[in-house]
Amino acid sequence: MEKLIDQIKERIVSGGEITKEEALKVMNIDENNSELCDYLFHAANEIRKAFVGNKADLCTIMNVKSGKCSEDCTYCSQSAHYNTGVKMYDLLDYDKVLERALEMQSEGAHRFSLVSSGRGPMGEEFKDLVNFYEKLDQDTIIKICASHGLISYEQALKLKETGVKRYHHNLETSPRYYEKICTTHTYEDRINTILNVQKAGIEVCCGGILGLGETVEDRIDMAYEIKRLKIKSVPINILTPVPGTPLEDNEIVSPMEILKTIAIYRLILPKASIRYAGGRIALGDLQEKGLHAGINGALVGNYLTTIGNKIPQDIEMIKKAGFEV
């Protein structure tokens, strides 16, 4: 297996690619074989250094509208289809948005994104969001991102005009498995939003969630879909099962399985910014190890409905791992 990993690494560094069959074979390394896992992580780390260097990209998010979502995504605490006790509120005032943006900017984050619940913004809500972004472009120097569900090409163009640099829209899982986690919109709907955003000239941030009940092949297929779409920023989320959702009893993915997945994503997506996102607390004290297994970015601070690490704490860990922030 070490020989295969070496061959794959050398091929990728020389401009080649890993095949799906190879990815599946490497992904099936026994997680209890720590020596072989470390060999894989080292190879992924070398590929990361070769293609994206040591600069870490730190992003933050703000839940600007919470709950009452019409969609039935089985993992989500904000869906109106489930009784989760999540806090619900309509679009926040701009003053609160600016306060949070300036706080994230002062703490050293590179990017700040507004996230709103719902299928997609319409009418006055979209106009209000456009107004927010126009003001943020004037009132801050942090890079502004957005995450508002399904949007049209015309909406994407409008966001581009306001200064939005990147739009976040996950695939969540493989094309095959997607219908198992959502029935109120399709996988193709998500693909169309990504294509709309790219056509408008905005970068896309697109990843998924580990632990939805998917297979290893589903995870790898999602990585190849991301590669096909030429995505530059790839967040890796780990499911935190929420009571009241259909996935409340799902088993949390093991730390070594998470790290192996990160490493395989780096082999498949050597030039991407692969970032820690929600749920990385599942890694426990192995979070730093992921920074030597292919990670080169992180969602820092609090998440949508859960508490994350403090930004200075994350920056300290990332610098300790040899990154520039």
Image (cartoon, grey):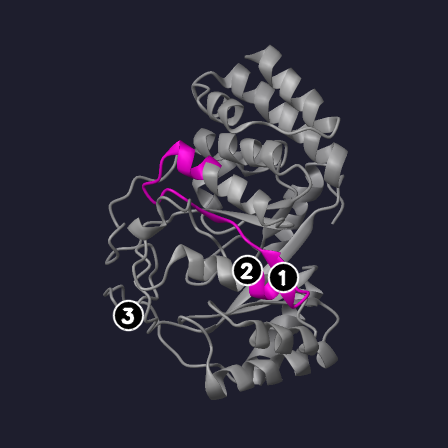
Residue 126 position (above or below residue 112): below
Q: Could you tell me if the residues under marks 1 and 2 are in contact, i.e. CB atoms within 8 Å?
A: yes
Residue 168 appears in view: no
Question: Label 2, on which residue?
Answer: 194
**Three-letter residue code for mark 3:** Ala
Alpha-carbon span between mark 3 and mark 2: 25 Å
Vertical comparison of 133 with 79: above or below: below
Of 183 and 262, nearer the camera is: 183
Q: Residue 160: where, in percent of width, then height? A: 67, 73
Secondary structure beneath dot 1 equals: helix
Sequence-earlier tag: 1 or 3: 3
- Which amino acid type is shown beneath numbered disc 2? Ile
Could you tell which of marks 3 and 2 lies nearer the N-terminus? 3
Task: Identify which residue, 301 or 64, lies in the foreground.
Answer: 64
Question: Relative to residue 88, is residue 256 depicted above or below?
Answer: above
The residue located at (23%, 65%) in the rendering is 83
Image check: 60 left or right of 115? Answer: right
Question: Of the numbered discs in the image, which one, if any, rests on residue 198?
Answer: 1
Q: Which mark is residue 80?
A: 3
Residue at horizontal 46 percent and vertical 44 percent from the top: 281
Q: Residue 302, which numbered label?
A: none
